[in-house]
């Protein structure tokens, strides 16, 4: 568990220990990179939108569930926001015609096998689960992105 103020300057302090944990568990570089990207996108969203600048913390919990399934939970006590309700952004429109926002959440959905949100008391809890192959699997990843 890593709990730090919700500041973009803390991104590396959340991500590096989790990356080291994943590498130590034998994940291939591609799988670690996918998890890092999803984690970074989620953390940036909380840092930017959950609190007034510098007024809250983010707690990141991580663990191996079973059979190379990895759980990462991002917990904050900011404004309630169910990220799972955001619609899929329009990806085929010209960039000048697209609505701003939503691409980070789209990336998280594509990288994680499961993404759920719950509000528990005064906390937002974003739960990400990744199914990842160990290095011995020649880098083949069983990630099954969410639709």
Image (tube, grey):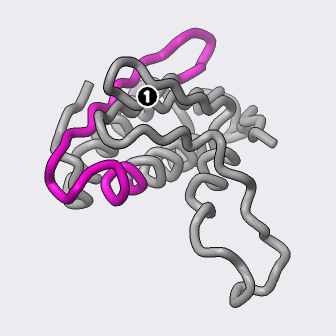
Q: Which residue is mark 1?
A: 125
Q: Quadrant of the N terminus?
A: top left
| Image coords of residue 108 (percent x, y) | 60, 47
For disc 1, the neighbor class at 10 Å (few under 14, some 14 to 19, many from 20) is many
Q: Residue at x 51, y 28 (%)?
A: 127
Q: Determine whether, in the image, residue 80 is placed left or right of residue 92.
A: left
Q: Is residue 128 magenta?
A: no
Q: Quadrant of residue 77?
A: top left
Q: Residue at x 67, y 41 (%)?
A: 139
Q: Quadrant of the C terminus?
A: top right
Q: Is residue 57 magenta?
A: yes
Query: Residue lying furthest bottom in this view?
Result: 96
| Image coords of residue 71 (percent x, y) | 50, 23
Residue 22 visible in the shown view: yes
Residue 131 vertical placement versus 90 (above, below): above
| Image coords of residue 70 (percent x, y) | 53, 23
Q: Determine whether, in the image, residue 10 is placed left or right of residue 83.
A: left
Most foreground residue, 32 or 145: 145
Q: Which residues are magenta?
A: 44-70
Residue 11 vertical placement versus 123 (above, below): below
Residue 132 visible in the shown view: no
Residue 97 vertical placement versus 12 (above, below): below
């Amino acid at each position: 568990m890593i709990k730090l103020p919700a500041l973009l300057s803390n991104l590396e302090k959340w991500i590096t220990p989790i990356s080291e944990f994943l590498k130590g568990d034998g994940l291939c570089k591609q799988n670690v990179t996918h998890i890092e990207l999803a984690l970074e996108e989620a953390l940036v969203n909380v840092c930017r939108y959950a609190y007034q600048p510098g007024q809250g913390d983010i707690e990141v919990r991580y663990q191996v569930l079973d059979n190379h399934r990895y759980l990462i939970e991002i917990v904050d006590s900011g404004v309630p926001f169910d990220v799972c309700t955001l619609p899929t952004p329009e990806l085929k429109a010209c960039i000048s015609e697209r609505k701003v926002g939503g691409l980070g959440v789209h990336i998280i959905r594509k990288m994680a096998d499961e993404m759920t949100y719950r509000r528990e008391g005064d906390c937002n809890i974003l739960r990400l689960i990744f199914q990842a192959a160990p290095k011995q699997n020649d880098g083949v990843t069983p990630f099954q992105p969410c639709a």
